[in-house]
């Protein structure tokens, strides 16, 4: 197949890391097909080794109008000149139309949870813009031949919201981040003093970080060994931090327990995980957070939201609580910090869950299968490239 890949939607965060890993794997094991990718400048694709079956086209797409023009004018034009069999947007809605079948990968969970507390807490600006973005996504998805999602839960929810039949969905789970290769698990029991509760995430509304001061306050009322909460956000006043800062101001007793370390590069996350006694992820929404997989890889017990996306991903490898109930979260954290049997069980379940996840080669095969299904071709295979 000749596959035109639209990577224009990705420019930062976990989506960018996934896109870079995908393009790297295409270079290693995608040589049965020809791949031409649209990418933004300066985000790392030009530093990856490429094979003769890969070409990159760097395009400026700053701002929504420029991105829409690239995706809805330039990409369809290039699909014709490249002789593409399919247009594949791994992470985003992509173009509304193309001269060949389209396959999209949808990782944004906002549209799948219209009942989420996120909507009640969202700013007026978010509530004004988000419905427009979701209408575009729905139109793109409804015209796509295949839709790749990361969990069966997401497939069911999007099918209901978008009115799309189940057979058009392909589940391609997330897997271990590239930086985990060679990273040893954390020691058990944890050696850090005070015990560290690690919270990794950008201060986006879906991450629900404003609950943390109330969780810390509830935890401080319990008889526990010394502990601290390490949060990967920057100092007061940063972008998106107003709700978190306001919550800290409203709970002054909690601030002494919370240490803000700022954003941490992937290459440096290993030391944070190995120093952690528990990982807390109180998200209101997730598609498939890399934090879950990373915590399980390092054998660090997880406490997360009692919501369907979390249970789908983590199964028995986490303790669950209502993400809006600080006392319930504090109770689960206390158990994870102090109950040796609970810790041992969560650690073992986490290792088993990670071992069952597909590696990047298997994930690429699932994407290729979706593309082949879209064009009605026989089931395609991934050719293993030279090591």
Image (cartoon, rainbow, N blue to C red):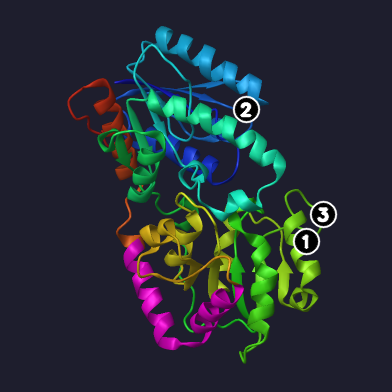
Report the span colored magenta.
Answer: 326-353
| 10 Å crowding of disc 1: few (<14), some (14-19), many (20+) | some
Find out whether residue 329 is within the magenta segment: yes
Q: Does the magenta stretch include residue 82?
A: no
At 58% from the left and 71% from the top, the residue drawn is 325
* Position above or below: 297 against 377: below
Mark 2 highlights which residue? 41
Give the position of the N terminus as an image quadrant: top left
Q: Residue at x 36, y 79 (%)?
A: 345
Q: Where residue 84 sits: x, y (%)?
A: 36, 15
Q: Quadrant of residue 86?
A: top left
Mark 1 near mark 3, Cβ–Cβ under 8 Å?
yes
Name the residue carrying label 1: 245
Relative vertical location of residue 303 with respect to residue 109 in this rendering, above or below: below
Earlier sequence position, callout 3 versus callout 2: 2
Disc 3 versus disc 2: distance between alpha carbons?
29 Å
The residue that label 3 is drawn on is 237
The quarter in which the C terminus is drawn is: top left
């Amino acid at each position: 197949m000749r596959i035109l890949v639209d990577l224009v939607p990705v420019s930062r965060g976990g989506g960018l890391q996934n896109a870079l890993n995908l393009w790297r794997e295409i270079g290693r094991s995608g040589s049965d097909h020809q791949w031409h990718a649209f990418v933004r400048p300066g985000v790392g694709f030009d530093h990856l080794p490429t094979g003769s079956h890969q070409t990159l086209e760097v395009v400026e797409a700053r701002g929504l109008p420029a991105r829409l023009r690239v995706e809805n004018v330039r990409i369809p034009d290039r699909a014709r000149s490249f002789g593409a069999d399919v247009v594949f947007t791994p992470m985003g809605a992509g173009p509304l139309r193309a001269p060949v079948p389209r396959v999209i990968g949808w990782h944004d969970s906002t549209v799948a949870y219209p009942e989420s507390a996120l909507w009640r807490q969202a700013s007026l600006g978010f509530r004004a813009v988000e419905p427009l973005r979701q209408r575009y996504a729905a139109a793109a998805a409804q015209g796509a031949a295949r839709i790749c999602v990361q969990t069966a839960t997401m497939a069911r929810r999007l099918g209901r919201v978008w009115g799309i039949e189940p057979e058009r969905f392909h589940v391609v789970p997330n897997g271990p981040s590239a930086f985990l290769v060679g990273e040893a698990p954390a020691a058990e029991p944890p050696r850090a003093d005070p015990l560290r509760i690690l919270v990794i995430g950008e201060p986006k509304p879906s991450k629900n970080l404003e609950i943390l001061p109330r969780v810390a306050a509830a935890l401080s009322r319990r008889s526990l060994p010394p502990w601290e909460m390490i949060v990967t956000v920057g100092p007061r006043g940063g972008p998106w931090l107003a709700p978190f800062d306001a919550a800290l101001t409203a709970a002054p007793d909690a601030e002494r327990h919370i240490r803000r370390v700022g954003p941490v590069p992937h290459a440096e996350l290993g030391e944070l995980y190995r120093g952690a006694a528990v990982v807390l992820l109180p998200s209101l929404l997730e598609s498939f957070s890399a934090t879950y997989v990373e915590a399980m890889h390092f054998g660090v017990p997880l406490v997360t939201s009692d919501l369907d996306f979390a249970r789908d991903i983590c199964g028995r490898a986490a303790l669950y609580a209502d993400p809006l109930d600080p006392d319930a979260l504090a109770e689960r954290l206390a158990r994870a910090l102090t109950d040796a049997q609970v810790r041992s069980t969560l650690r073992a379940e986490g290792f088993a869950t990670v071992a069952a996840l597909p590696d990047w080669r298997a994930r690429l095969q699932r994407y290729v299968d979706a593309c082949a299904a879209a064009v009605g071709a026989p089931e395609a295979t991934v050719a293993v490239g030279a090591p």
